[in-house]
Image (cartoon, rainbow, N blue to C red):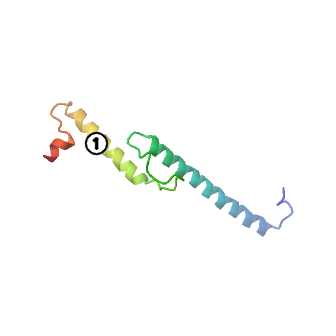
Amino acid sequence: MRRKDMDKKEKFRLMAEDTREDEEFRRNVIENLALTISRILPGGDAGAGKSDGSRLFDADAQKAAERQQEVERLRARNMGGQGAPNRNQRQQ
């Protein structure tokens, strides 16, 4: 309503600014949600990071860890759970 009587250039500039602010807000919300979820998942680092939540979420590292866990589950399933060495036995 306040922009009703503004010239087109000013309206366009304000709309672009609003869009940038909205994207920044959404990005911050998503990053904070991802951080919170990563902390509550099994194996998460509930005590890590600063209390203000400024620790960055590393999605690539999370995906790599999940892939590794899936590979280990599939390997154990394919071996039927028999004779599947655990990590400590493999290192000996």
Q: Position of residue 85 (x, y in %)?
A: 17, 38
Left or right, 90 with reference to 57: left
The residue depicted at 23 percent of the width and 35 percent of the height is: 76
- Please identify the quarter of the rendering in which residue 6 is found: bottom right
Q: Position of residue 77 (x, y in %)?
A: 24, 33
Count the numbered circles shown.
Answer: 1
- Please identify the quarter of the rendering in which residue 1 is found: bottom right
Considering only vertical position in the picture, is 4 above or below 67? below
Left or right, 59 with reference to 15: left
Q: Position of residue 55 (x, y in %)?
A: 48, 55
Q: Which residue lies under the disc numbered 1?
A: 71
The residue depicted at 44 percent of the width and 47 percent of the height is: 47
The residue depicted at 27 percent of the width and 37 percent of the height is: 74
- Check disc 1 and report its element: helix, strand or loop: helix
Q: Position of residue 63 (x, y in %)?
A: 38, 48
Seen as rendered, the residue at the extreme right is 5
Question: Nearest the camera: 75 or 84?
Answer: 84
Question: Nearest the camera: 89 or 74?
Answer: 89
- Please identify the quarter of the rendering in which residue 71 is found: top left
Question: Nearest the camera: 49 or 65?
Answer: 49
Seen as rendered, the residue at the extreme left is 92
Amino acid type, callout 1: Val
Q: Is disc 1 surrounded by few (<14), some (14 to 19) or many (20+) residues within 10 Å? A: few
Considering only vertical position in the picture, is 13 above or below 78? below
